[in-house]
Image (cartoon, helix red, strand yellow):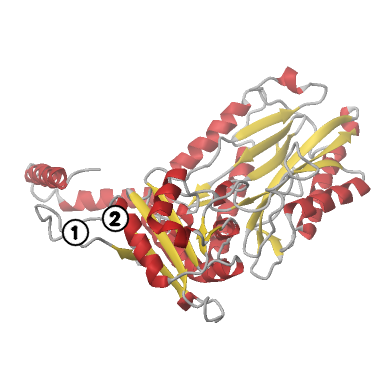
Amino acid sequence: MISFTFVRALRRSWSGALAAALAATPAGAQDTPRREQVQAVRTDSAARRPFGTQRELAAMQQAWLAKRLDAFVPGLMRKHGVDFWIVAMREYNEDPVFSAITSPETYSARRRTIYVFFDKCAATGVDPAPSCGERIALGGTSQGGVWQARRTTKAIEGGIGGLRAELWGDEQWQALRQVVEEKQPRVIGIDRSRVFAFSDGLSSGELEGMSEALGPQWTARFKDAEGLPLELIASRLPDEEAFYKKMTEHVWAMTQEMFSGRVIVPGSTRTSDLVWWWRQRLADEGLGNWFQPSVDVQRRGVTESQLGDDPIIQRGDVLHCDVGLTVAGLNTDTQHMAYVLLPGETDAPAGLKRALANGNAMQDIAMEEIRPARTGNEILASVIARIRALGIDGTMYSHPIGLNGHGAGPLIGLWDYQDGVAGRGDAKVIPSMWYSIELQATTPVPEWGGQPVRMAMEEDMIIGADGKPRWALRRQDSLFIVR
């Protein structure tokens, strides 16, 4: 943090330096060149910002925040039997739900922040609606007006601009008790879970302080919310779905460019060159990523260990990438496949096309089986049974995605757990959530002497508010070709 005194001094120094620089500029040479330079910067910057400026993105995220809290919280609180939900945290030890309930301009909790949701309609039985919800912040700001921020009445020594002191220490817990006694909740939800990390954001120290302040009368009404933060984090708006399609289009354009002769020179380019091409492109465009991208090779007659960690790409290779993109607080996760043509070839061998088609069949089955109210383990069992009936050798390991890369919600298998995932696979799919359909199909390829080739594929999909699944963009049904 920078002190007020330091900021004022810095502004004065900037102003003085700017005035001196302008005074030294020849008359008549100040305005036009500067306007041209500004215009050039704007044009160049716009070309590198495929999703807009940081300011534009933040305004969009702020609008999403207000809509999400109104659209999802009242119904989820009623669904999970909670009329008063406490989310308490300290700076740098934020609850996983933090990014789902705060402004894009807020990077961390403020000293201690206690967020309170109250369903004032629960006692009357009125259907949940935005007007039923009260949101109170004890510590921190209103997050752009979506929270009612309560501050202390304590005067600041020295009186800095008439500001009032922030809530601090035990005073915050006493303020929470005051709110509890004011609202008289029946069930108090807290973020504690032994299964889901997204639902286990209440630290032991915060639980201890809160329990001591509220006393046995109110702690007796504590309930592990568990499904409430899990499903709030997972829930997405139609506005976000439209933006996500643009993100997915950008990923597709990048993977197709990366797996092309514009980037790859067979016999010269290494897989690590493509990894860093991806990283650099994202940096140049002001975009982020939530994991290190990877590129690997399969080659006829050569084992994985013989290829090594960073092989040079050769003609006849099958290429695979696992890449992601982060923008406006949302994440993608994509795996695409490519083939490097041999001299005289105009397309990939039929056996490789068939291998990709087996992966597509698995994707089709997954899309048919993923439905709201089904658990991840139920979906996994159905998918595995159906691919085995078709004679496909494959594995399924799909995960939710959205505010987090490996997002909140039920797992549909893990690569090493194809019989189900206890706990995390028992949660249920809900409407308005997204998935990364991640899987692999291994198929013997006749043109490679029967050598098995793995098609590891991943595409993001959307489950609409109506419960119907669809691809965020589309799936890969043909290999990218490097000529």
> For numbered disc 1, what is the local secondary structure?
loop
- Report, in whole angstroms, how far the alpha carbon at label 2 lies from the one at label 1: 11 Å
Side of 481 relative to 192 (left or right): right
Residue 251 seen by the camera: yes
Q: Is residue 166 above or below residue 397?
A: below
* Residue type for callout 2: Glu
Pointer 1 local density, CA inside 10 Å: few below 14, some 14–19, many at least 20? few
Q: Which residue is denoted by mark 2 in the rendering?
A: 171
Q: Residue at x 48, y 43 (%)?
A: 288
Residue 105 seen by the camera: no
Q: Percent position (x, y) of residue 233?
A: 55, 56
The quarter of the displayed image where residue 263 is located: top right
> Quarter holding the N terminus?
top left
Q: Which of the two residues, 230 or 218, is positioned nearer the viewer here?
A: 218
The quarter of the displayed image where residue 396 is located: top right
Q: Which residue is denoted by mark 1 in the rendering?
A: 154
